[in-house]
Amino acid sequence: MYEISVGMDFDAAHSLRGYRGKCETLHGHRFKVVAKLKGSKLDEVGLAYDFSLLKQHLREILSKYDHTCLNEIPPFDRINPSSENIAVTIYKELKKKLTKAPVSLASIEVWESPQSRVVYYPD
């Protein structure tokens, strides 16, 4: 089994509705997102999945969040833009882009600081 991963950053502001503490007020992060794929077969070139293609997919998804207030854009205008919700949202969007790929999406990590991260794994 092979694991392929790429990481990418985006900058955004958010606040957590209903949270009691500092994160209830508007603040920003440089979010780091790591997408991990699993694959068991290599293509004729010797790749399980092309890093460039995975980066392109992730860049397309993250570009709509970069330099925004997450609370103002879907789906975070309805759900809290917690790292957990950001991770599952990115997972669902990336999974759609990989429907015909020879790999499966293993997880999405969202780091909101160098010390704090969430990892979403599918059930």
Image (cartoon, rainbow, N blue to C red):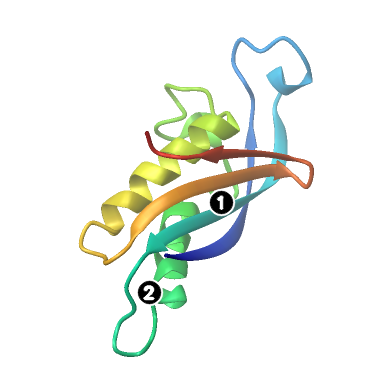
Image coordinates for residue 112, horizontal then vertical, percent: 69, 41
- Residue 118 at what x, y percent from top left? 61, 37
Q: CA distance from mark 2 to mark 1?
A: 29 Å
Image quarter (top left, top right, bottom left or bottom right) of the N terminus: bottom left
Which residue is the site of mark 1? Answer: 66
Vertical position of residue 95 compared to residue 120: above or below: below
Q: Please, is residue 10 above or below residue 76 in the view?
A: below
Q: Position of residue 96 (x, y in %)?
A: 27, 51
Circle 2 packing at 10 Å, graded few (<14), some (14-19), many (20+), is: many
The extreme bottom residue here reads 45
Residue assigned mark 2: 48
The part of the image, by quadrant, that contains residue 74 is top left
Q: Is residue 27 above or below residue 58?
A: above
Residue in the picture at 23% in, 56% down: 99
Q: Amino acid at mark 2?
A: Ala
Residue sitting nearer the eye, 38 or 18: 38
Q: Give the side of residue 16 with respect to residue 77, left or right.
A: right
Q: Residue 97, located in which quarter of the rendered image? A: bottom left
**Mark 1: secondary structure:** loop
- Amino acid type, label 1: Asp
Q: Is residue 52 left or right of residue 7?
A: left
Side of 30 where 95 appears, left or right:
left
Q: Residue at x 47, y 68 (%)?
A: 55
